Image: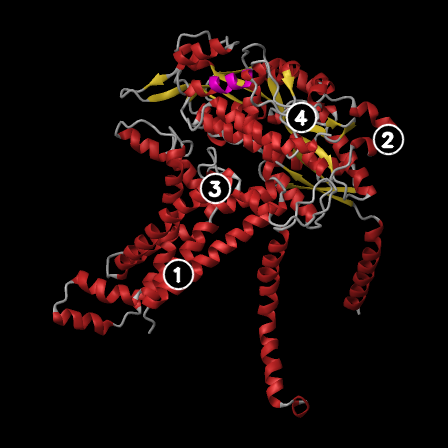
Amino acid sequence: MRRLLGGRRLDAVHGWLLLLPAAVLLATFTHYPILASLVDSVRSTPRGGQPAVFVGLENYGFMAADPIFWRVMGNNVVFALGTIPASIVLALLMATWIDRRLPARALVRLAYFTPTILPMVAVANIWLFFYTPQFGLLDQVRALFGAAHHNWLGDPSTVMGCLIVMTVWKEAGFFSIFYLAALQHLPPDLKEAAAIEGTPRWTFFRRVTLPLLMPTTLFVLVNATINSFKLVDQLFILTKGGPDNASNLLLYYLYEVAFGYNDWAYAATLTVLLLAILAVLAIAQFGLIERRVHYR
Amino acid sequence: MFSLSVRRITAALLAVGLFALPARAATELTMYYPIAVGGPIPKLIDSMIAEFEKGHPAIKVTAVYAGNYDDTRNKALAALKAGNPVQLSVLFSIDLFELIDQDVIVPFDDLVTAADKPWLESFYPGLMENSRTKGKTWGIPFQRSTIVLYWNKDAFKQAGLDPNKPPATWGEMVEMAKRLVQKGASGNVTRYGLMIPSTGYPYWMFQALARQNGEVLMNQDGNRTFFDKPAVVEALAFWRDLGGTHGVMPKGTVEWGTLREAFLQGKTAMMWHTTGNLTPVRTGAKFDFGVAMLPASKMRGSPTGGGNFYVFKKASPEERKAAVAFIKWMTAPEQAARWSIETGYMGVTRAAYDTPALKKYAAEFPAAAVARDQLQHAVAELAVHENARVKKLLDDAIQAALTGGKEPKAALAEAQAGAERILSRYRR
C-alpha cells in the first residue's frame, strides 16, 4: 500500500482525512449558508405558490429605502459604542482588582463571573424586574430618595441605555477572565525591576502591563464587536425592539423579517449585510491594531 | 434450564410484541400551542389531552408549548419547513391569511363529513369572522377572548365612587380615573387610574378604541386598511392624552406582561386586558374586583382575539381524521365549559354556556359571562395579508404616538401608506 501510493502521498491523504470532519462541519454550517444567503438575496421571496425568481439588486434597493433598517443600523452603532469600550475597560479594572491578594478573593471572582454563567434570557428576566415601573427594583430604590418613578423600557430615550447597562454587566465578567489569565502570566521579574527602580504604579501599568496585555485586548475587542451585533436574546424578553423600534437591533430585525414576515429574500439580504459588516470590522481590527500588539 | 426457558419466553414475547406493535400503532399528532397569559394553561391542556386519549386509544397527541402567538407561529412554520411532523396547531386567529398565502393549512370544509356541518355552524358567528374567508372555514375557535375592563372595587370605594358602577363612556372613564389617581407625599403617583397595555398587542387594544369611535381598521378580504380615517386618528389621540393631558395613565408604553401584576398590586385601579386573564386575576386579587364591557365613545366595541385550531396540509389522511376528532372533542360543550371556567377564556359555543357547569359558574361569578355578552359589540381582530408586517406598522405608529415621537395623525398616515404598499398586491 505504502509503496503503491508513495509515502508522501499517503501522508497527504492522511492529513486530509484528519481535516475532513472539521472541513465538512465548516462547509455545512458556514460556507454553504453564506453562499445560500448570497443567492437568496438576489431572488424574490416565494409567495402564494409563486416560485422565487431572479430580481438582481432589488432587495438591496428595498433595504436602502427601508426607514426601519436605517433606524436599526443607527441603534446598533449606539449599542456597539455603548457596550464595547465600557465592557472592556470594566473587565480590565475588575481583573486587576481580583488579581491582587484580597480577602475572600474566590468569592469576589465568583461574583464577577456569575453574570457570564447565566443564560441571557434569565438575565433579561431578572433585569425586566429591575426596570419595571413603580414596583421594579430601580424605581423602589429611587422612591427612597423621593424621585418620581420612570418607565425605563417604555421611554425611547432611556430604553437603549437600559439595554447597554445590562449587556455590559453581562459581558464584563466574561472578558475579565481573559484579562485575569493574561495578568497572571506576566513575568514577575518586570515588576521586581520596576519596584527597584521606584517606578510609579500608574507608569508601570501604562508602559508595561497595558502593552503586554495587547494580544488579550485585541481578542476581547474582536469578540465584543461581534457580540454587539450578535446579542439579541434580551430583546425577546425586554422590549421586542420597541417602543417604536427604539431598541431594535440588526439581528433582531433580521429575525423578525425572516420568521415574523416570512420574507426570506429580504432576510437573506440583511444577512449578507451583517456578514459584510462583521468581516470589514474584523479585518480592520486585525489590520490596524495588530501592528501595535506585542506577541511573546 | 429454568433461566434458559425464561430467556426464550422473553425473546418470544419480545418478538410477538415487535410484530404486534405496528398493527396497533397509534396515530401520533403533534400540536404547537401558544401561551399568551400566565397561569397553569399547559397543565390544563395536558390533562384534557390525557382524558381525550383515554377515550380514543388509537390517537396520541403531543402538545408543544412554544411561547406567545408569534413565537408559536414561527416555530410551527419552521418545523413544517424543516419537515418535522406537525399536524395541527392552535395559532393566532389572525394568522389566517398568512397561513393561506403560505399554502400550509386545509379548510375544514374538505375535512368534515356532511354529518359534521352542524358542528361547524355551532360556534358564535362573531368568533367565526376570523375563521372564514373566500367562502371557506379555515380555523376552529378555541382559545378565544375579547378585551374587558377590570376594576378594583376597593379603590373605587376609597375614591368615593360607586364600586358597582364601572365607567360606561370615555368621558366617565376619564373622570373616574382622575379621581382614582393617588399621589405620595412627594407628589409621585402611587396609583394610576387606568392602564391600557401598549406592548405585546398594541394594535388589539387600539382596535377597541377605534371601534368605540365608530370605525373598523380593515375589510373582510384582508386587503385594505383604514388607519388614517379621522375617527381612528381621534382614537389614538385619546389614548395618548390619557397619559399626557389627563395624567391618569403612565407616559410611554405600558407593558402587557407585567400589567396584571400591577393591577393585583394596586398600582392601577382599572385595566384593559384579555378575558383570558380572568381566572388568574380572580385567584390573585386580595381585593374585591369587577369585570365590565369596555366603555363607549360613539358605540361599544372590542375586537375578538385569541387562537384557533388549524390543520396542516402536510398531515396524512389518517392524521387529518384524528386531528378533526381531537378538535371536535376539545370544542364539545363540556370541554369548552371546563376550559372557560378554568382559564377565563370564553366558551366558544352557545351550547357551552348551556351546560350545567358553566351556567352555575356564571350565576355565582357574573364576570365570567361579560366576554360573551360583549360579543354582540365585537368586531374581527385585525387580520390582513402579510399580517405580521402590517400589524407591526400599526404597532410602531401607536408606540410612536404614545411615547411622543410623532403626532397621531402623522404616525397613522405613515402606517397607512406602508400598509397600502403591501396590500395593493393582493387586490385583483
Instruction: Select label 1 or label 4 by which is in front.
Output: 1
User: Are tags 4 and 3 found on a single chain?
Assistant: no
In this picture, residue B4 sits left or right of residue B383:
right
How far is mark 3 from mark 2, CA to CA?
53 Å
Instruction: Give amino acid for label 4.
Output: Arg
Foreground residue among B179 and B419? B419
Q: Please, is residue B183 above or below residue B310 in the view? A: above
The residue labelled by disc 4 is B338
User: Are tags 3 and 2 found on a single chain?
Assistant: no
Q: Residues within 10 Å of mark 1 (few under 14, many from 20)?
A: some
Tell me the magenta residue range: B231-238
Q: Position of residue B64 (x, y in %)?
A: 64, 42
User: Are tags 3 and 1 found on a single chain?
Assistant: yes
Q: Chain of mark 4?
A: B
Q: Chain of mark 2?
A: B
Residue contact at pointers 4 and 3, CB within 8 angstroms: no
Reading the chain from its start, which is encountered first: label 3 or label 1?
3
Q: Position of residue B379 (x, y in %)?
A: 64, 19
Tell me the chief SS of the magenta region. Answer: helix
Q: Chain of mark 3?
A: A
Give the number of the disc on residue A84.
none
Q: Please, is residue B259 above or below residue B52 in the view? A: above
Instruction: Give amino acid for label 3.
Output: Trp
Q: Chain of mark 1?
A: A
Residue contact at pointers 1 and 4, CB within 8 angstroms: no
User: Are tags 2 and 1 found on a single chain?
Assistant: no
Give the number of the disc on residue A70.
3
Instruction: Select label 3 or label 2 by which is in front.
Output: 3
Foreground residue among B418 and B211? B418
How far is mark 4 from mark 3, CA to CA?
49 Å
Element carrying mark 1: helix
